[in-house]
Image (spheres, helix red, strand yellow):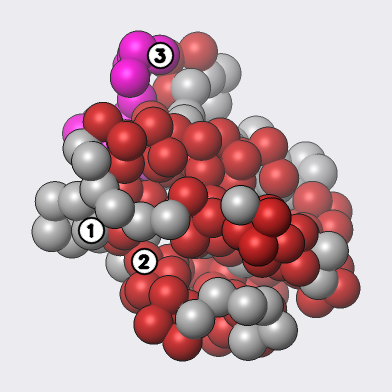
Amino acid sequence: MIHHMERIRTLLEHPYYRSCLQEIEQLEHDRIYCRHGLSHLLDVARIAALLAADRKASYPRDVIYAAALLHDLGRLKQYTTGQPHAEAGIAMAQDILQDTAFTPQEQAEILEAIGGHQTGAAPDSLTQLLYEADEASRMCFACPAAETCYWPEERRNHTVLL
Ligand SMILES: [Fe+2]
Ligand SMILES: [Fe+2]
């Protein structure tokens, strides 16, 4: 257990992770749509862990948390270069993961989930958990910017019950 807490702590305290989050927060300061800061990332982590437990998916909890905490880093690159954020986030997440104690196979799974988090994948894959948790985390039912949001109707979340 301590080992698992350590792996997440290394990620959370990683200087590059911290600076990416800080820059995203600054760039999204006036954004009227969903933001991609730590509260979103943690919402997704917790919801994905719930979904995984419901489905008896066997991912270690900290692998699920790592994928969620890293899944939107690419926003930073998207805002500055226009590259889609799921794709842009892979290399950024890799720079951080390589300094953690996640195994090479876990790192590969996490990176794959980040790259696919906007399209989904096979049921119970880490990618699909992330995709669904990302959707479920959003409060589209109470969003003042819903009218002009780019999210298609079928991805919008209208419930709070999981
Ligand atoms: Fe995203
Ligand atoms: Fe997200």
In this view, 1 is above or below 86: above
- Horizontal and vertical percent for residue 75? 60, 64
State the CA–CA distance, disc 3 to disc 1: 23 Å
Residue 8 visible: no
At x 76% / y 68%, what residue is drawn? 10
Examine the structure image and report whether residue 79 is included in the region drawn in magenta: no
Q: Quadrant of the C terminus?
A: top left
The answer to which quarter of the image holds residue 111 is bottom left
At x 80% / y 44%, what residue is drawn? 29
* Residue 131 or residue 85, whichever sits in front: 131
- SS at badge 3: loop
The answer to which quarter of the image holds residue 109 is bottom left
In this view, 8 is above or below 19: above
What segment carries the magenta color?
151-162
Say left or right for 83 vs 57.
Answer: right
The answer to which quarter of the image holds residue 81 is bottom right
- Horizontal and vertical percent for residue 97? 61, 78
Say left or right for 17 vs 71.
Answer: right
The amino acid on which the numbered mark 3 sits, given as a three-letter code, is Val
Residue 98 visible: yes
The residue wearing badge 3 is 160
The amino acid on which the numbered mark 2 sits, given as a three-letter code, is Ala
Q: Residue furthest left?
A: 122
State the CA–CA distance, disc 2 to disc 1: 8 Å
Q: Earlier in the sequence, mark 3 or mark 1?
A: 1
The residue wearing badge 2 is 113
At x 35% / y 12%, what residue is drawn? 161
At x 23% / y 41%, what residue is drawn? 56
The amino acid on which the numbered mark 1 sits, given as a three-letter code, is Ser
- Disc ID at residue 125: 1
State whether the magenta stretch is mostly helix, strand or loop.
Answer: loop
- SS at badge 2: helix
